[in-house]
Structure formats: C-alpha cells, structure tokens
Image (cartoon, grey):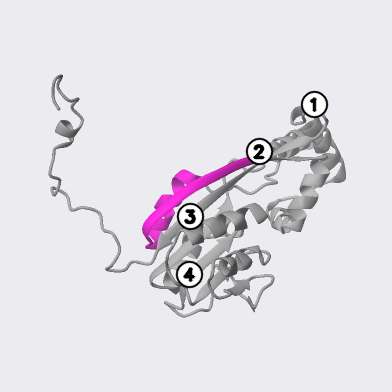
Amino acid sequence: MTRAADDLLDRLLTVKREFPRALDLGSPNGHFAQAVIASGRPPPLRASAYAGDVIVDEEAPPFAPGSFDLIVSGMSLQWVNDLPGALAQARRMLAPDGLFLACLAGGASLVELRAALAQAEEEITGGASPRVSPFVDVRDMGGLLQRAGFALPVADIDSFTLRYDSMFALMQDLRAMGAANALAKRARKSLRRDIVARAAQVYAERFSDADGRVRATFEIVWASGWAPHESQQKPAKPGSAMMRLEDAMKSPREGDA
C-alpha cells in the first residue's frame, strides 16, 4: 500500500490543478489520503465499508452527483461485486473536469499462492475451490473506464515481486491489508488446516529462492479518467488529417533534404 501511495503522489504532482473537494473511496488505510495532502491539496473525505470518516457501500455511495473534484481509491475496487457499476458511480460523483485515480490488484497478482493452494486442495480432497478471487486485466480497464463515461481514460500497470519468510508470512501481510476476509467470503468451503499446511510445503518447493525465502508476485493496475468538460482535448474528427497514413509511412527518398 505504501508503494501505491507513493505512486499516487507522483501522479498527482504532475497535475497542475486544484482539487478543493476530494474523496478517498474505499482505501483500507490512510496512505492515499496522506498522499493527497502531500500533493498540496486539502484532506480528502475518507469513505469505505469498514473505516474512515463515513461508512459507505463503495458500490452505492450516498453522495450527490458532482460532489467531488477528485476521487482516489487504493487497492479496494478489486473486491466489489460490480466493478463497472462502481466506476459509473465514481463518474457520477465527479464534477465536470474532475479527476478519478484508482489502483487495484491486477490479474497476475498472487499467482504463486493460487497455484500452491490449488495443488494442495487437489491432492487432499480431489478438487479445488477458488481461494483467490479473479482480478482485473489491464487490457480491460480502459474499456471499463470508457463504458463508465470517463473522458481521456488511461490504464497502466506496475508489476513487482516481494519475498517472504514463508507462505504464512505472506498470508499475514494479506490479512493486514484486509484481503484475507474478502478471500474467505469468496471460498465455497472453509480452508482446512491440512490443506494450508500442504500448500505451504508446495509454495516452498516451487517458489522459493536459494536462501529459502518465497516469492510473491503483485500486479497493480492503475486507472485514471476525467469527468467530461468542454475544455478537454478532443480527438480529431475523421477525415481531418493533413496527410495520408500511406504517405507518412513512406521512407524519405535518397538525396532528399
């Protein structure tokens, strides 16, 4: 979360705009709010289902249309049941020319944990339940932002690997982020202790380094978009180009200056 908050600060510092009314939607702790303050903006209102200034349902926030000039969200939207709907709600709450900046877990996150749990459960019970919920793919995020009505949508990705003493240390870290509870709600059956123990063995066998520490892949998908406004850059109209693409791609002739 600290890495994501630092990235948010960098992104906000590149935007030369005032955002007097800001909302931190769903972030599990105060890291994103602090990033907004560090960028020189007023403290955002923190709203989530578990903590903050206001307790809300991220999929049905009670705020009026156009209530905020900036909405940020850190590592929480991957848990909502209706991501397109949540994005549409964020767009609704933005004033014209307001900015939405959010990050959420990407599709390659925790591939090692998924594999270890699936193998352990398959060995012990003969079948596997989904223990880690599916995450969004960066290739889909741009389309989801457009569908929600955002202008100038951008999606990019930050991939990195962390190392832990064991699978249990990783799960403790996930629990501190509030992820363990969300994962438990999505599992069809409770996770038995013998399955967890075997998964830890599989994890160490398949995904450890020479020093015995295990690897965990994390992927953060960033999404940004603006509430439409007449002052924003517009795409060129079809047929307005001054040169044909075919001509632009031709190599200069030998001897041309």
From the image, state whether disc 4 or disc 3 is nearer to you.
4
Residue at 52% x, 73% y: name it.
22
Measure the C-alpha gap from mark 2 to mark 4: 33 Å
Residue at 70% x, 55% y: name it.
179
From the image, state whether disc 2 or disc 4 is nearer to you.
4
Above or below for 136 versus 25: above
Q: What residue type is disc 3 on?
A: Ala
Q: Which residue is mark 3?
A: 223
Q: What residue type is disc 2 on?
A: Val
Q: Nearer the viewer, residue 103 or 178?
A: 103
The circle on residue 111 is 2
71 horizontally vs 246: left or right: right
Q: What residue span does the magenta drawing correspond to?
A: 138-160
**Residue 99 visible to an observer of this rendering:** yes
Q: What residue type is disc 4 on?
A: Leu
Count the marks.
Answer: 4
Label 3 element class: strand
The mark that comes first in sequence, 2 or 4, is 4
The mark that comes first in sequence, 4 or 3, is 4
Task: Tell me residue 12's x, y (percent).
Answer: 50, 61
